[in-house]
Image (tube, rainbow, N blue to C red):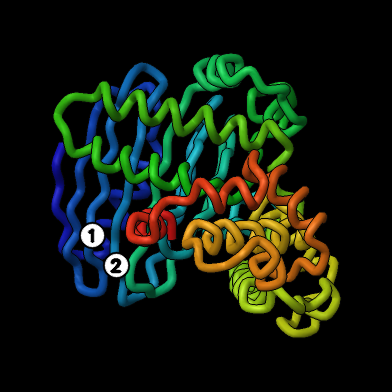
Amino acid sequence: MEMRFREIGELTTSLQTYMNNFSPYDSCDAAWLFEAHGLEGHFVTRTLAPGFSVSFVDASLDTVFRFKTKSSQTGLVKIGINLEGIMESKIKGYRHEICGFPGQSYISRVDGEMEMESLISPQKRIRLLEIHFGRDLFRSLCDDSECSLTSYLKSVAGENGNAFTYCSTVLPPAQEETALDIINALSRPEKEAAEALCREFAQRTIIHVGRGMQSASTVISASDIEKIRQSRALLEENLITPPSLKEMAVIIGLNDYKLKAGYRQAYGSTYHRTLTELRLEKARRILLKKDRSVSETAMEVGYGNLGDFGIAFKKRFGMTPRMMLVNALPSEITQVVDTFTD
């Protein structure tokens, strides 16, 4: 079913109707193209198998887009990733505001009636990919992932009575690449490639959350997200003398509790682990270019003790800094690799 919309009101009404009646067990694919004043883009959804579908939206907005939905979905599990843009949502009966931001992935379950209001502020582009599962299929994916279920994943699998469960985290870069592969596969007539990629993406996300990388119970607001992203950028710029958590909280205008909770929510890690990850990733890039010694690299990323640097580096990459330096690619090839890993 292909539809074109040239009025925002018409699109809003159709979107609300579609989401109110959505079920992953439907067999109707849809493709929408919207070219209304202040809003351009497209939306596509495909059913891959019974209880298994995927949708993708890619749009740019010059105006606020707000819509409300009310549905009675049973056992619907969603695994999604926000590739670009910010969207805020409020769920009736759920005390936290949900805010999606670039790089964020989430798992949620809806069981019963749910009322939701979503708001997308004017922005150059928003791209959202979402995979939908019936509860039984989600449970089988958890079993296939062979990970010990956290309390959160147990609740998603339906082992408690909550009508709505939600968790968000930031996934490794490889997951974003898989998401882009899914989007490309959606343009092909055959469904096998999209189905395989969606299963791969879902299982990797389940494993990531199953290892305890889910967010804290505190859901941060859109303004807080921007401050936390700012703090991460500041960390990356100050690896040698980074601000402490309390100092960073003062710099960006958040209290230290919210900053600590925000890092778990946004990046699935602590403030200090994020600092370590940033240091080691920069060290890896330096060593691959073969223009610094191991000791120079350690100093450049903020390690005063060479032994501590070596231990942390080997734990992260499975080899010592010297092994990576010796086995580094030629500088010309490294530049190409870095282009694709930025």
Contact (CB < 8 A) between labels 1 and 2?
Answer: yes
Residue 154, x across and y down, in percent:
71, 25
Which of 127 and 274 lies nearest the eye of the viewer?
274
Name the residue: 19% across, 58% down: 34
SS under mark 2: strand
Residue 29, x across and y down, in percent:
23, 32
**Which residue, given by chain and number where applicable, does mark 2 sit on?**
60
Which of 57 and 89 lies nearest the eye of the viewer?
57
Query: Amino acid type of disc 1?
Result: Gly
**Which residue, given by chain and number where applicable, does mark 1 sit on?**
41
Which of 109 and 105 lies nearest the eye of the viewer?
105
Q: Quadrant of residue 225?
A: bottom right
From this viewpoint, is residue 228 visible? Answer: no
From this viewpoint, is residue 241 visible? Answer: yes
Horizontally, is 75 left or right of 94 in the view? left
Horizontally, is 189 left or right of 324 in the view? left
Sequence-first disc among 1 and 2: 1
Q: Quadrant of residue 250?
A: bottom right
- The image quadrant where one finds the N terminus is top left
